[in-house]
Structures are given as structure tokens and as C-alpha cells.
Amino acid sequence: MLDICLLGSGGMMPLPYRWLTSLMVRYNGDSLLIDCGEGTQIAIREKGWSFKPINVICFTHYHGDHISGLPGLLLTMGNAERTEPLTLIGPKGLERVVNALRVIAPELPFPIICKEINGPEEEFELADGYFLKAFKVSHSVPCYGYSLQLKRAGKFQLERALERNIPKIYWSRLQKGEIIVDGENQYTPEMVLGEPRKGIKLTYCTDTRPVQSIVDNALGSDLFICEGMYGEKDKDAKAREHRHMTFYEAAKLAKAAEVKELWLTHYSPSLTYPEEYMDEVRKIFPEAKAGKDKKSVELDFEKEE
């Protein structure tokens, strides 16, 4: 299960009712952040979640509204006597940007591991069966979207295990994906498992024009969280000029990617009531929702008959 909270839904500047962009995902006792805008700490507190399990922070890009909350968050983690390593993932220049921000957070009781994304796409294995994929989008600076996937192996096939005379002591290990060598015999998970079952997929992207890489990587997502900076129909030219997206462009991407649900986020400060525009958006993609601070959902595997 993925436990998801859109901590902040604002772009450019924080407002009294809207923090800057950040997403938190919890899985199996660990937490991951995508972006860390101003107000992220407050939003986590308001949600009632903890800083302690955060072990990965990803950045889409290095504009201030996506990373300005990092130094304060690092200090809070340090003051909580954290000693576990923290992994940061982002476009090239990550270490330089983080070191600059750490001028005001120089002494921390835990190591920071910086992983810069190489090329247009890169995948990171966060845990067994839990993957993060970064994919390049189109903004005024290098920028990436992210897909999180919980992959699910096929069901254990008793008949296949018996047919191959695989010792029972190895069955559970094979179910967990382990390859076992026993003398001259080698047993692989494929020998006892059926076809992979549908997993869980979350895709997040912001600060970009509509590009094919978004459709390709969001394809079949259970939840697609996408920038919708402007809802007003007359802001199309402005969106193009500043390399952002409108509500309607995001909805078209959701439709093309055949996702289950769309949440809009990263609103312009001038956009006070996103819901005003959602009727038109839902004409393009019926399962579209206006994201808001602390909007949450639990994504679980589909129930089997």
C-alpha cells in the first residue's frame, strides 16, 4: 500500500491557505518526499505525520518554490537527533545546490547522499519491489517527473513446484524473488510463480509543457498528480511562455495516459478557487480533481477474486 499526501499545492509563492509544492509518500515504514517547498514542515505537522521516516527526498528542479524548504527540514531532522543517512535525488547540479543551501545548516548529525539523475530517464530501486523512475520533462531549466511503482509478483503455483520436485523449504524464498542454488540444481522464482499481477503506480510531474514522456511514464497510473498552473482560458499563452501547463492540458495528458485519477496541483498565486474550472476539465477527463493541501489517499493492490 502507498499512503499519499499532497502537502502543498501552490506554485511561485506561499499563501495563507496554500503551501508550496510538496508530496509525501509512505510505504512500509519509510517516507519519500517529492519537492520541498516553503511550508513543507508545517504541512507535515498539520497532517500529523512524522519527519523521522523520511529517507528519500526527490527534486523535480531547483527553482525556489520546489527546494526552499530543505534547509529548515534538515535542521529539524538534525535537532531530532537523526543519525540515519538521507538520500537526495535530483537533476544535475544537486550537490552544488544542496551545499549552497546548507550554508545555513552546516552541521548535521547524519550523512547526506546525493544522487544526480543521468540522462532522460533513470530508475532507482528503493526497496524490494519498490521503484522510483525519473523522466525528463520540458521546463525553462532541467526538470524531471517521477513515477513510483510497487511491483507485484505472480501467485505461487503449487502444481509447478511439485512438478519440478522443488523442495518445500525453498518455496517461501522463491516467492520472495530469491534465486536458490542447491548443489547442481538452480531454482528461480519464474519456476513457481504465475504471471506478474497488477501493482500500484503513482506519477507526479510539475513545471513543464505537455510532452510525450509524461504520457509514456504516466501510462496506466492509479493516480496522476500533475501541474495545472492556470485554469483561466485566457492564460494559455502565458503558460506557453513560462513553460507551464493549464488545467485542460493536464486533463488531456491524463486521458492519453489512461490513468485512473488526476489531481491538479502547483496553482498560480492568482488562482484562488481551482474548483471553479473543474466542470470544464471533467469534460476532458471525468476523474479529475482539484488538488489541495493535505489531500490524501491510500492506494492498495486490487482485490483478487
Image (tube, rainbow, N blue to C red):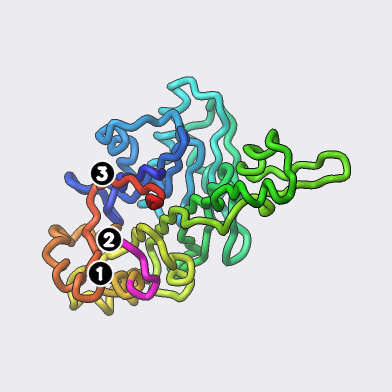
Q: Is residue 282 left or right of residue 110?
A: left
Q: Is residue 61 visible?
A: no
Q: CA distance from mark 3 to mark 1?
A: 20 Å
Residue position for label 3: 294
Q: Residue at x 28, y 45 (%)?
A: 296
Residue under numbered circle 1: 247
The x, y position of residue 169, in whole percent, is 69, 33
What residue type is disc 2 on?
Answer: Leu
Q: Which residue is mark 2?
A: 264
Name above or below for residue 10 compared with residue 167: below
Amino acid found under the numbered disc labelled 1: Phe
**Do the residues under discs 3 and 1 have CB atoms within 8 angstroms?**
no
Q: Of callouts 1 and 2, which one flags the residue occurring earlier in the amino acid sequence?
A: 1
- On residue 163, the disc is none
Q: Position of residue 6 (x, y in %)?
A: 31, 48
- Secondary-structure class at tag 2: strand
* Residue numbers of the magenta segment: 255-261
Residue 54 coordinates in the image, percent (x, y): 46, 35
56 relative to 208, above or below: above
Instruction: Say which of 293 and 162 sits in front.
Output: 162
